[in-house]
Amino acid sequence: MLRHGSTQNFSEESGQGPLKLRSIAITGPITEETSVEVVRALLTMEAEDVKMPIVIFINTPGGSVYEAFAIYDVMKAIKPPIVTVGIGKIMSAGVLLVSAGNKGHRYATPNSYFMTHDMQCHSSGTFQDTDAQHKHLIDMRDRYLDIMAVETKMTLTVLKKKLLAEDYFTAKQAKKLGIIDFVSLKKPTAFFRDLE
């Protein structure tokens, strides 16, 4: 499920007036429906203002790698700065998305947890079919690893080890791995102030 609002106003105690909060919340499994809604929201917000940042809150058990790649590509293609905030659980494909924010503007709350694991394969059909599916899965995993190596401080060797089995870790550990930049609790508007 996704919630987004490009016209919400949050009053600032500093007296600087209300700030238009452009945010997207990705919660639950990452599905084709989620991907369509997130991409639509990102493109709409870019059309409204190419300079004002967009904050994406991520709380997901993961989901389709195809759909995560779709969201990732659009996050990288649009012009507005992207702030990512991991809350609750950031698992599987969700780790890719939280790492995709602008460097220096990727956050997680103190009590959030991360999880990485190897891609799952549910093959069916003839031997040739399953062989093709297996090769495709390896290609997708390699693509995922290449992206994560760019977005984080982890080498391909470290990433491959982490993906051999389920690996759970804290927000502080995610920071050390370069998945996020800060462990922080902030008011929604504070994330925007960082990019001004």
Image (cartoon, rainbow, N blue to C red):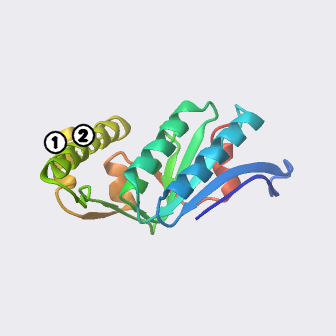
- Amino acid type, residue under disc 1 in the picture: Thr
> Toward which corner of the image does residue 79 lie, by quadrant?
top right
Residue at the (73%, 34%) spot, across then down: 47
Would residue 37 be found to the left or right of residue 127 on screen?
right
The dot on residue 139 is 2
Would residue 108 be found to the left or right of residue 138 on screen?
right
Q: Is residue 180 visible?
A: no
Disc 2 element: helix
The residue at which mark 1 appears reads as 157
Would residue 139 be found to the left or right of residue 76 on screen?
left
Frontmost residue, 49 versus 29: 29
Would residue 161 be found to the left or right of residue 109 on screen?
left
Residue at the (61%, 36%) spot, across then down: 81
Separation (CA) of disc 2 from disc 1: 16 Å
Quarter placement of the C terminus: top right
How crowded pointer 2 is (Cα within 10 Å; few <14, some 14-19, many 20+) is rated as few
How crowded pointer 1 is (Cα within 10 Å; few <14, some 14-19, many 20+) is rated as few
- Amino acid type, residue under disc 2 in the picture: Asp
Q: Position of residue 74 (x, y in %)?
A: 54, 38
Frontmost residue, 28 versus 123: 123
Residue at the front extreme of this rendering: 126
The dot on residue 85 is none
> Toward which corner of the image does residue 120 lie, by quadrant?
bottom left
Q: Position of residue 183 (x, y in %)?
A: 47, 56
Q: Position of residue 64 (x, y in %)?
A: 40, 55
Quarter placement of the N terminus: bottom right
Disc 1 element: helix
> Toward which corner of the image does residue 5 lie, by quadrant?
bottom right
Q: Nearer the viewer, mark 2 or mark 1?
A: 2
